[in-house]
Amino acid sequence: MKKTDWIERLLYRWSCLIGLALLFLPLASCTEEVFDYEHPDVEIFVKQLKDGNLSAQNPDGTGQMPKFAVKDIGELLEYADDLSVIPSFPLAPVSYSAGGKLRLGECLLWTVETIRLGHNASMGCKMVHVDAENYEGIYFLSDEEVKDAVARYRHWWENRKYPRTMWTVDPCWNEPLCGSGYMWW
């Protein structure tokens, strides 16, 4: 066998392997996950919020909040400890103008509160101290206070598994922020 035949066969095999790899590359390439606002997936929602890829507006330019339900609260609370700063959040225009950073966990708590109430919890996804005179940054919660609020929401959610009876004494049974000194503006 000649040295040139051996090289030609080797080149032929490698070109076949490269050709096959290129043929299957489009099938294995990354695709952008599409977020369905009617049937939202919490994991995709959180990932797109963190990446700044969530389209938070309808075609007409108005804000659009995903239609999360009570069944999503537990999963939303799983991510609430993450206080990463996010570039935007649906329906939170006041948060931008008030000068505060948008923290993922706090915005997820806003989503949980919105589900709990059945309407928007506030004009923006920032909690303030109960003595706040307005929606300024000096009244916004610190990271530690937001983590305390997360713990309160989780406690509330865990206690919701037990039905309220005439023997229930806890006045905060259905109020996650009761006694905390925090509120949604």
Image: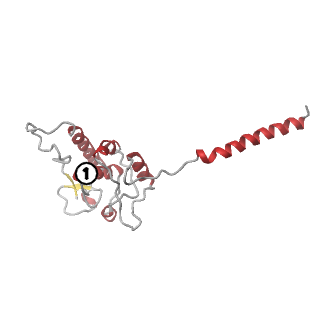
Q: Is residue 13 left or right of residue 107?
A: right
Residue placed furthest toward the bottom: 60
Residue situated in front as seen by the camera: 23 or 51: 23
Residue placed furthest toward the right: 2
Res 5 quadrant in image: top right
In the rendered image, residue 173, in percent from the top left (x then y), is placed at 15, 43
Q: Is residue 69 above or below residue 162?
A: below
In the rendered image, residue 20, in percent from the top left (x then y), is placed at 69, 42
Point 67% across, 46% down: residue = 23
Q: The N terminus appears in which quarter of the rendering?
A: top right
Point 40% across, 50% down: residue = 45
Q: Which residue is mark 1?
A: 113
Residue situated in front as seen by the camera: 181 or 109: 109
Residue placed furthest toward the front: 38
Q: Is residue 34 left or right of residue 29?
A: left
Which amino acid does the dot numbered 1 rest on?
A: Glu
Point 42% across, 59% down: residue = 55
Q: Secondary structure at mark 1?
A: helix
Q: Is residue 165 left or right of residue 51?
A: left
Q: The C terminus appears in which quarter of the rendering?
A: bottom left
Q: Is residue 83 left or right of residue 175?
A: right
In the rendered image, residue 118, in percent from the top left (x then y), is placed at 24, 54
Res 136 quadrant in image: bottom left
In the rendered image, residue 167, in percent from the top left (x then y), is placed at 8, 36
